Amino acid sequence: MDTAKDYDYDSIVTYLKKRPHGASVSEISRDTNHTRATVAKYLEILNLKSEVVCRTVGKAKVWNALKDSRKSVLIVSKEPNFIKLLKIALGSTEYDFNSFSDGDSVLGSLVDDMPDLLLLHPGAPGKSWQDICRIMKENPLTNNVPILIIFERLTQRDRETARRCGADDYISMPLDTDTLKSKINSFFRPNKGTINIVTNLPATDAASEFYDRNKNRISLGVLMSISESDAYKQKFGKAKLDELLRILSQLIKEQTVFFDKNCYLSHLNESDFLVMYHLLSDEEAMRCYNHITLSFKEIFHYLSEYSCPVLNVKILKNNELQSYLAINPKK
């Protein structure tokens, strides 16, 4: 991305940060001296880079700058003072907090605001902590959110139940804040083979585990990769390739979820993306990926003056998925 375009992008983000209630394309165009078409295209790219977000107010679309890079933590507890303690112990400079006093509100909130971590304090009314764990871990859209249970008194039965329900970790009262911080920090350190450190998508180990748990329900997989990614990296550098991969991952995520909300997107090796579908035909999969390829080409010229890399697509049947994940090197 050249310096002039960098400045244009930055000017739009800076403008939106000064408008906490957001702005329309027309307002941004008027106040930044860009055409409406240019603003619309820049906003699309900034949205793919997770720097801005669009929301609908009535019939109008309003754009907002996203928050800073602090991790978001959702706390569920019926005790306000306990929630206050957790916020003080963890620190508002490092995390953005949201909280609920009942279990029923948690699952509904995930539609609009997906947290980076869920802290569950058993005893809240509504959905039990066991039900919340099971529902979130069975849903491909939420099963990557770490869940930590904070028990009043941890028993062996609690440990077994937590593991069976899919909780990622647990801790007991009286609360040791240093131990709590250590456990939380471990969730945000990329784990080789589990999380791809460029896109934060599930990597090979996580994809293999998902397949093993759901192979009887998966209809097919689609493998998409950037052709000659090594040559692209050698010519433009790793930072440019990483930027390209992040944008492509967002494009794939938006389109695949539209076709199958229960699909599972993973990032394998350096430039391979694998999507596993529950209910999708070969024709629907190719229609989805033709749209992704077209969109990728349309926005690429805003990122570089050079020709757009070719995206290779291959459909894998269930048995081919198993073979691919078995031989795919873990990176």
Image (cartoon, grey):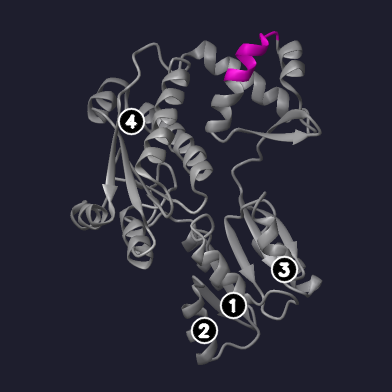
Mark 4 / mark 1, whichever is N-terminal:
1
- Which residue does the image show at 71% across and 81% down from the upper left? 123
- Residue 158, by quadrant, is bottom right
Identify the amino acid type marked 1: Gln
Q: Circle 1 — which element? A: helix
* Mark 3 vs mark 4: in front: 3
Q: In the image, which disc is placed on residue 104?
A: 3
258 in the magenta segment: no
Q: Amino acid at mark 3?
A: Asp
Residue wearing tag 4 = 238
Q: At numbered mark 4, what does the secondary structure look like: helix, strand or loop? A: helix
- Assess disc 1: are there few (<14), some (14-19) or many (≥20) residues with their C-alpha within 10 Å of its C-alpha: some
Q: Residue at x 33, y 51 (%)?
A: 220
Q: Which residue lies under the disc numbered 1? A: 130
Q: Residue furthest left?
A: 327
The answer to which of marks 3 and 1 sits earlier in the sequence is 3
Label 3: how many residues lie within 10 Å, few (<14), some (14-19) or many (20+)?
some
The amino acid pointed to by label 2 is Thr
Disc 3 to disc 1, how far (Cα)?
Answer: 12 Å
Dots 4, 1 in contact, CB < 8 A: no
Seen at 42% across and 23% down, the residue is: 294
Magenta range is 33-41
The reply to whether the C-beta atoms of the residues labelled 3 and 1 are less than 8 Å apart is no
Mark 1 or mark 2, which has the lower sequence index? 1
Q: Nearer the viewer, residue 251 or 198?
A: 251
Q: Is residue 178 at all visible to an observer of this figure? A: no
Do the residues bearing badges 1 and 2 touch, measured as CB atoms within 8 Å? yes
Cα separation between marks 2 and 3: 20 Å
- Between 61 and 64, the residue placed more toward the observer is 61
Q: Quadrant where the N terminus lies?
A: top left
Q: Residue at x 71, y 36 (%)?
A: 55
